Image (spheres, rainbow, N blue to C red):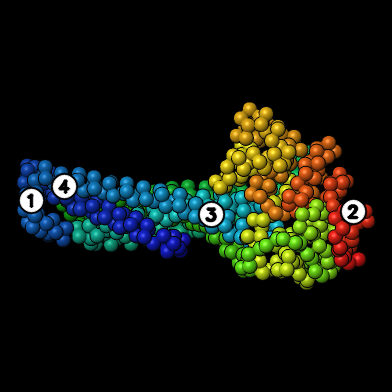
């Protein structure tokens, strides 16, 4: 029940309202059950079978009913008792409906809160932590584990509901026959204890399911991202073998879970039915209780045992899903511990240059940048070239503050980057990656990313600056045309231009292009580079590339290799001085 208590602590007010509603629903039903006893006494034990007062009985329940009738002045006729019985059940049904409505809202709220907490924690992490995380694991947590966690909350509430009802039934039953009630509760507890092994096995199966789903979806995500080369080499079967093995393990786990669930149901029915039949025989034959008492006791004890049976089944379902909650909470807490430090409070001002001063950076023991010093003047168009792994993207990550130098300083004008408000600095940057990631949505949404601050005029101007307005205007719905699988099909160059428009729409001062032309054909690359050349002077452009066309648009070109950077002769067109190492 640790999980249920955790939810109650997180949502104390809403949980209290739900518990109170369920409690009063149970009390309403208990009141109805007390009316059932005199009603049956009239129908079964009283002479003539109708119309009189309840038969005399020395049970505590009978005395309580008689006292209630005397205080309220109600004559316990058949009609009155039936009316009270029906009204109590209507009240119970109304309260249960209200409680279930709130529980339904809470189930959705739990899933939403877990998902948003995970997203916010993940987006706020250090870049070095983020890039090491398996995307499939977080996808699984967002989709599967959050949903199973919410279901665990639902099962927990059902357990609590059934236990409340069991307590109410037990109180009424104790007032009628404490011996039979204690024997029933004792036997029911023994049966539930004997069957706890099946609950434990189901819990273990739930943990395995959570672990295997995380691994399986991580592998599947990585495989889908690399499917093109696998299909090109006819080696997709190798990925199929790996996925098949994990899927078969998941299948075995699900079979154990199903078996434990069904076995619990069957054994509960068998053991409880056997005990119940024996109990009725003892009460009716050995203890020679009146038939009305036996009927009410039979009903009450049946409800007690049935409620306990259902509570154990719901508890089993809860522990199966419980591991998903602790898994998603573990991911969220791990991400929160890796929160990016953005403590600098100085508002950025970019009027002169971005400067590296003796910057050194390494990944673990691999030195990437070796004491480099380099200047990117405001308004310039700078290109950095070099072999893969030389550290070109690392320079970009240092400028955006995603990485921090282990030695040396990155300056924006005369302020160290570590002292700036990083959020404010990044809002001054437009970033165009190599991968042209577009949403299956309209061109407008792809540019603005749903930010309501941007208008259609802003998006149109960004498209014009990116050289994309002409082909977008010719689409069936213009800027509101859907792109993607079921929408407009775009060429690689067109997709990249929309990505450039996305980077320009918020009016950045610095435009960064991370291999932005590497996936384009020569004609598309030349067109995009011509568009970028027209942006020179309006904003500062920094690009890394392996290709030649973009060099023609640049003011200066640096080559980065072996941890050192040098200016290529003939590529410094703005006459700025630069210091370099190597």
Question: Can the viewer see residue 367?
Answer: no
Q: Residues within 10 Å of mark 2 (few under 14, many from 20)?
A: some
Label 4 or label 2, whichever comes before in sequence order: 4
Question: Counting residues from the N terminus, which is met first, the one under dot 4 or under dot 3?
Answer: 4
At horizontal 75% and vertical 34% (from top left) the residue drawn is 491
Residue 422 in view, yes or no: yes
Circle 1 — which element? loop
Q: Is residue 488 above or below residue 278?
A: above
Assess whether mark 3 and mark 4 are in contact (beta carbons under 8 angstroms): no
Q: CA distance from mark 4 to mark 3?
A: 48 Å
Tag 4 residue? 84
Q: Position of residue 45 (x, y in %)?
A: 11, 47
What residue would you read off at disc 1?
Answer: 74
The answer to which quarter of the image holds residue 477 is top right
* Of the pair 258 and 371, the residue shown nearer to us: 371
- Find numbered disc 3 in the image and state the secondary structure of the residue it sits on: helix
- Closer to viewer: mark 4 or mark 3: 3
């Amino acid at each position: 029940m640790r999980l249920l208590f955790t939810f109650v602590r997180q949502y104390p007010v809403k949980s209290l309202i739900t518990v109170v509603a369920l409690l009063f629903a149970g009390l309403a039903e208990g009141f109805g059950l007390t009316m059932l006893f005199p009603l049956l006494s009239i129908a079964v034990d009283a002479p003539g079978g109708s119309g009189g007062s309840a038969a005399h009985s020395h049970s505590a329940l009978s005395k309580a009913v008689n006292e209630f009738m005397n205080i309220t002045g109600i004559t316990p006729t058949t009609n009155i008792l039936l009316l009270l019985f029906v009204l109590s059940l209507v009240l119970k049904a109304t309260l249960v409906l209200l409680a279930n409505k709130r529980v339904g809202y809470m189930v959705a709220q739990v899933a939403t809160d877990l998902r948003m907490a995970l997203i916010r924690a993940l987006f706020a992490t250090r870049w070095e932590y983020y890039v090491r995380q398996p995307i499939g694991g977080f996808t699984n947590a967002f989709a599967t584990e959050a949903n199973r966690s919410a279901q665990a909350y639902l099962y927990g509430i059902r357990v609590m509901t059934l236990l409340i009802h069991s307590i109410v039934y037990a109180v009424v039953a104790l007032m009628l026959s404490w011996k039979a009630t204690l024997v029933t509760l004792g036997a029911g507890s023994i049966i539930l204890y004997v069957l706890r092994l099946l609950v434990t096995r189901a819990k273990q199966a739930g943990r395995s399911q959570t672990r295997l789903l995380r691994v399986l979806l991580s592998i599947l995500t990585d495989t889908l991202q690399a499917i093109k080369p696998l299909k090109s080499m006819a080696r997709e079967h190798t990925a199929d073998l790996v996925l098949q093995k994990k899927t078969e393990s998941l299948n075995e786990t699900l079979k154990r879970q199903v078996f434990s669930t069904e076995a619990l149901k069957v054994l509960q029915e068998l053991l409880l039915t056997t005990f119940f039949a024996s109990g009725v025989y003892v009460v009716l034959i050995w203890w020679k209780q009146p038939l009305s008492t036996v009927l009410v006791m039979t009903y009450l004890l049946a409800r007690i045992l049935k409620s306990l049976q259902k509570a154990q089944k719901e508890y089993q379902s809860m522990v199966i899903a419980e591991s998903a909650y602790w898994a998603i909470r573990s991911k969220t807490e791990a991400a929160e511990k890796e929160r990016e430090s953005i403590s600098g409070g100085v508002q950025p001002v970019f009027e002169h240059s971005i400067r590296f001063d003796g910057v050194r950076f390494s990944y673990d023991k691999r030195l990437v940048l070796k004491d480099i010093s380099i200047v990117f003047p405001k308004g310039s168009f700078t290109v950095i070239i070099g072999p893969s792994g030389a550290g070109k993207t690392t320079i970009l990550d240092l400028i955006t503050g995603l990485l921090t130098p282990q030695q040396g300083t990155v300056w924006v004008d005369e302020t160290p980057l570590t002292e700036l408000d990083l959020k404010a600095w990044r809002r001054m940057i437009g970033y165009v990656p190599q991968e042209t990631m577009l949403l299956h949505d309209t061109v407008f949404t792809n540019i603005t990313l749903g930010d309501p601050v941007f208008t259609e005029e802003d998006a149109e101007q960004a498209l014009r600056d990116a050289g994309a307005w002409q082909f977008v205007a010719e689409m069936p719905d213009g800027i509101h045309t859907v792109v993607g699988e079921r929408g407009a099909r775009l060429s690689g160059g067109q997709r990249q231009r929309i990505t450039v428009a996305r980077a320009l729409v918020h009016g950045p001062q610095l435009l960064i292009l991370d291999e932005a032309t590497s996936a384009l054909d020569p004609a598309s690359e030349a067109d995009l580079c011509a568009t970028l050349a027209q942006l020179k002077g309006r904003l500062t452009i920094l690009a890394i590339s392996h290709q030649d066309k973009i060099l023609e648009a640049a003011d200066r070109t640096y080559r980065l290799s072996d941890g050192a950077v040098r200016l290529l002769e003939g590529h410094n067109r703005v006459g700025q001085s630069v210091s370099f190492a190597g």
